[in-house]
Image (cartoon, helix red, strand yellow):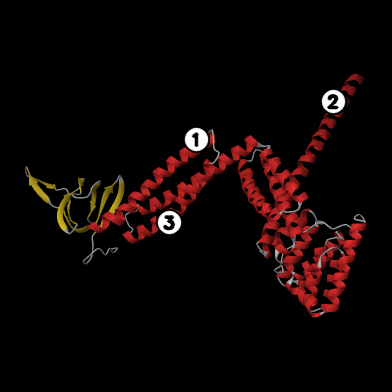
Amino acid sequence: MRPLFLAVVLVAGVAFAQSGGEEKAAEPAAAAEKEGIKEEILRKLLRASELKEWNRVLGFATELLAMDRNNADAHYLRGVALLELNRAQEAQEEFQKVKEIDSGYVDAYVGMARVAAKLGDGETAKRRIEQAVATGLTVREIQAAPSLVKYLTEDLEFLLRLWEKEAQFKIVARRDPFQCPIKKAHPHVGDGTSSSKYPRKDQMLALKRVRIEVDRLKRALTGKDLQTALDAWRSAEEQYKKAQKVVSDADLAADLSETWQSLQKLGPQIQKLKELALKQAVDECIKGISRVYQDVIRPDMTRQERLERLADAKPYDEKLKRTLLEAKEGAHGRMLALVKDAEQRRKLAWSNIEAQKEFYTKVWPRLRLTGIIEGTVMQEGEEKILPPNVFMEIDHKTVTIPERAPVPGVERLTLQRVDRFERRVEMIYRSQPVYLRMKEGAGNVEKKP
């Protein structure tokens, strides 16, 4: 029995070890997933702050803090949102938490100064401004905040004190950058501050946004989630173009270039995303044109309604032409084949729109439906219904036309069907269904029955 007991213990030990190994292997994956979620929330938070959608900023910041309660950026942006929503006391608490987490977060002092200014406490506002300048913010940056600039313009002595503190900070920073470092940039929003007044901060924030999207793209590619990867790639490309206009610092420009080059190394995967993006863009435009066409061929619309709806197809066509023109540049292989296929689909969809437009702008004004004839005849003792005929004025000349007969004097136009109850005829023009309704009164004024 002893060997059997040892075998059981050994097997149990191995199983336990394997279970522990699986748990340890799962931990990095779970941590990576959590970091991905946090980065996604931060991306939405920064975007909402850019658009100054303060309720959304408040929601995203609160969501991020639920996962990372010591995130200084989230506390700061939550404070800004609360301040913009006239909840000054709550904003003060958030800015205080930022200062506790990171004493070098200069914007926290600016936030507290804005709170004091809003509450009418000028002395506290000045004290916070001095703390911000002593920590590395420039007087010029303070001047960019409308609610704080009055303290600089109304008190010359205070302004001179600030300039002195700014100079002292620069001297100490040059002498010993480790003792008095220039603090990292933080998201700066609100109070109508112009982003051009904060070049260094704007540059670092622009670079951060590019990195967030690039990281999101790489995670999506690793997880083979092409749709999320495509969304991230579009956003990364947009943020990169913005960053190129903002980033001028040599070191940051090098980081930006290196970040973007890391994407270019994923050549085949990026090419696949470009193909997917082209396909989706083409499908969206073709569907838009098709929706317009399906509406226009409904029999119950007036001519004016059709012409107005036809005009809605033009933006889709213009967008499609731009998309194909951009995709064609440097295209080869599968991408070039996709472009050619899309051009054929566009040609077919747009030809339907052009046929409808041509009929209702050029042919319709020449026609006027004046009457419908439908009768019976006795043949071999039986009453038979005659096919309906219509009276139609063509260029002011009245003719009689039976069903399924060509309309005289008008090329490629055939009378297809007569609907005497709706006082309407369906015709075929250039293989497209078109309609003509019985007129009420003189001229070409069309009315719904």
Report the Cα–Cα distance between label 2 and label 1.
59 Å
Q: Residue at x 85, y 74 (%)?
A: 160
Q: Is residue 41 left or right of residue 178?
A: left
**Whether residue 59 can be seen here:** yes
Quadrant for the N terminus, please. Answer: top right
Q: Amino acid at mark 1?
A: Ala
| Helix, strand or loop at mark 3 | loop
> What residue is shown with label 3?
312
The kind of residue on which mark 2 rests is Val
The residue that disc 2 covers is 11
User: Which residue is found at the position 22% from the left and 56% from the top?
Assistant: 420
Residue located beneath label 1 in the image: 337
Residue 352 point in image, percent of width and height: 36, 47
> Disc 3 and disc 2: Cα gap in Å?
72 Å
Q: Residue at x 69, y 55 (%)?
A: 246
Asked which quadrant contains residue 52, the reply is bottom right
Provide residue 242's location: percent of width, then percent of height. Answer: 66, 54
- Report the mark closest to the observer, 1 or 3: 1
Classify mark 1: residues with Cα within 10 Å, few (<14), some (14-19) or many (20+): few
Q: Earlier in the sequence, mark 3 or mark 2?
A: 2
162 up-or-down from 220: above or below:
below
